[in-house]
Amino acid sequence: MRGTSVYAERVLAGTGERGGRGGAGQKARAIRGLGGLALLAGVLVALLLLPTLCTVGVGARDTSTWFQSEPADLDTSGVPLRSKILAADGSTIATFYYQNRIDVPLSKIAPVVRRAVLAIEDSRFYEHGALDSKGTLRALASNLGSGEVTQGGSGITQQYVKNLLLTQAESREQAQAAKEISAARKVRELRYAVALEKRFSKDEIFRRYLNIAYYGDGAYGIEAAARHYYDKPASRLNLNEAATLAGVIRYPYAYDPTRYPGRAKERRNVVLQRMAELGWIDRRTADLTAAQDLHLDLHDTPNGCVTSKAPFFCDYVQREILTNPVFGATPKARERLLKRGGLTIHTTLDWQTQKAAQRAVDSHVPRKNSARKAAAEALVQPGTGEIKGMVVDRKLGSDKVRGKTWINFAADASHGSSIGMQAGSTFKAFTLAAALEEDMPFGTRLMAPRRFVPTGYRNCKGERVGDPSSSLRNSADGEGGRTFSLTTGTQHSVNTFFLALQREVGLCDTVKMAERLGMRQAGGEPMQQFASFTLGFNTVSPLRLAAAYAAFGARGEYCSPIAIKRITDAAGKPVKVPGAGCKQVMDKGVADAVNHVLRGVLTKGTARGMGIGRPAAGKTGTVDNFSAAWFAGYTPDLAAAVWVGDPRGGYRYPMTSLCMDGTCYGSVFGATIPAPIWQDSMAGALAGRDATSFHRPPSHYFSKGSGEDKVKIPDVRGMKLRAAVARLRAAGFRVSVGRPVASERYEKGTVAEMEPGPGSAEPGDSITLRVSKGKKKLPGLPFPEPPRFPGLPD
């Protein structure tokens, strides 16, 4: 980083290896150090000149050959570059770095910057080789004459080597070796410099030097320094700014403009005068610029996710890279890639979706709410698995501070430290899907007792599960004591109905359906298999649940949730990333049937009134004892799952008589808080975007009717056809029109017949209407003219 030796700097600073700050001792040590430098300089110059001498011995020639040969361990890679995470629109979500550095080509560094650095560090750089023998000897003569270090002797190539070795150090021992005060280190540096002068052009060496040098206050490389001190790229720096940064390089701590502006200004002026001496700027320009203030415009680059506008999504991406072997064989290798690799990480985050979800969560469960409840939501695109949003009603940070948490409640333990939460009745959708896969019609009816004895279940190992001595009952969302169909049992979320349905289709079939849809416990373990599986006792994450429901919206195609679309390294080359692995896990018709039933939850069931103005489906979930509440819902374009609960423990702090920030809810169901969060976030996320419709399920699912409870059929006879059709459709029926019929009773153009006629039927049934074409015409007969009677009116 500097033009003088570390040893001489320590002597001048009074921090030499053997103690004190006294003037006489300091002067003596300086002279001894400079004498050593003179001897070393002579050796280095001799090594460079040896190949040109003909009278040297064999040993000297061998030494020179070794010195001039390229070192086997010379590696110019590994310079730490900062990585950045980008949203889908290319905006920055966060940056990660070990050293805040951005590598740029020489063409993106203003010419005035290049001149300023050359002037103060190595004005003859383009004229000499690895060692500027004239400059080195001149500097030594000046230093020995004054007894102080007044001029530097190391050229830019040597300084680059020193910075490179120090930057590549990954341990204290390596760093110490790069900074040790010894002739061996200096010889090693010069040998590397000789090799680099052969390997790279002068421009390339200079570019690398500008990008590796430290400019103080956490800014490494000229581009990061320009953005940090002046909030602009290096290509736009002016003379004042260029001279200031060039002056910092030799002593970045002593000339730090943020800590020592006076020193930085003096040093800047030295650079300006040196540029004038060289004729690279005129004296008047130098003087005018020297009279200016530094004009700093500081801009800090955050490191990590804490200050990100999407902190938990950012944290998810970070953990994906740090935990997935795709990005490196060891945790250390993966961390090195993220914090030193200069990656550009393109993600799936959609800001419209993210912001809508954050607003919804914060609105219904404020960050520092009086009840200390929490909420989390994950939003996934059907058919791609892309995570479009991920929010928690907290800031990312220490749990010791109210309103903050390090735990990402929206994700699995591997991506957020969460052990998951019981999912409640949202798991009933998997039992429904298993039943429909076995071609059970919507009208299939089962008795739902008020209490259910869990017998007759076997897990996937064939083992009996269930406890005949206990019973499960309808609670939270449910009701019972009568028969329900697949349709109405789902709409009303009847616990005992689903326990009976699960026994009918088989516990293992239900579990396998959930597994095909990507479900597993948040801790990574397989789901436990007991009779109450359909009631959602397994602990899962909102992200997994959202991805499973997204498969329904994608007509049975499941995609593993992904946050990273592609990554390029510092050279612009692609880095392998894990894919979504999309695959068809159920027939499209089965998924269409699931969608048909779950749509009714939003119109007639436990979440009625929670529609979003476009085709949508979903399922509420209320966990036992009101320890948590969920809602999972979707359209063909977006799926989301919302959890609301207490981070301190749901059973210990249930939501039975919840009052939060002045609003009292009583017992909290899935439709009480989670469904409104889902409604608001989905409406905001999809605003201005075209709606996609679900597909009608195959006809065989209607073989026993729609499964809806029967309702009265309006009598539309005598009404105009258009009005009659509108009336029946409003009542939930489908309408077809048959051939017109003659009618003595109903006027031409009005409905004369309807089939079935007035009575009751299931909503969704088809009603056939026939329009009157008027009275029947009698065939013409030869009747005589009727007689006329005088005195009577005609």
Image (tube, rainbow, N blue to C red):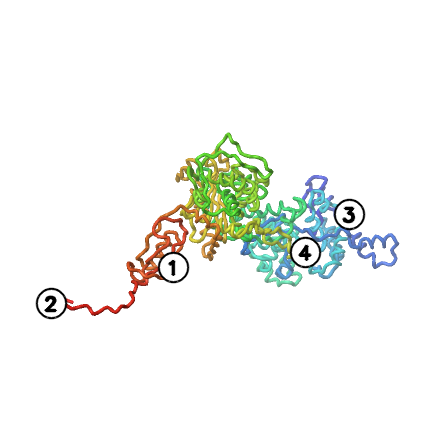
Say which quadrant the C terminus sits in.
bottom left
> Disc 2 marks which amino acid?
Gly
- In three-dimensional space, the C-alpha distance between marks 3 and 4, rounded to whole angstroms, equals 24 Å
Q: Nearer the viewer, residue 164 or 48?
A: 164
Side (left or right) of 462 relative to 6: left
Residue 420, quarter of picture = top right
Q: Which residue is mark 3?
A: 184
Query: Which residue position is annotated with label 4?
Result: 208
| Amino acid type, mark 1 | Val
Mark 2: give few (<14), some (14-19) or many (20+) Cα within 10 Å: few
Q: Earlier in the sequence, mark 3 or mark 2?
A: 3
Write the residue at 61% across / 57% down. Answer: 243
SS of the residue under disc 4: helix
Query: How far apart in space, not on screen, are marks 1 and 2 (Cα)?
Result: 53 Å
Which label belongs to residue 737? 1
**Image location (x, y in percent) of residue 700:** 48, 51
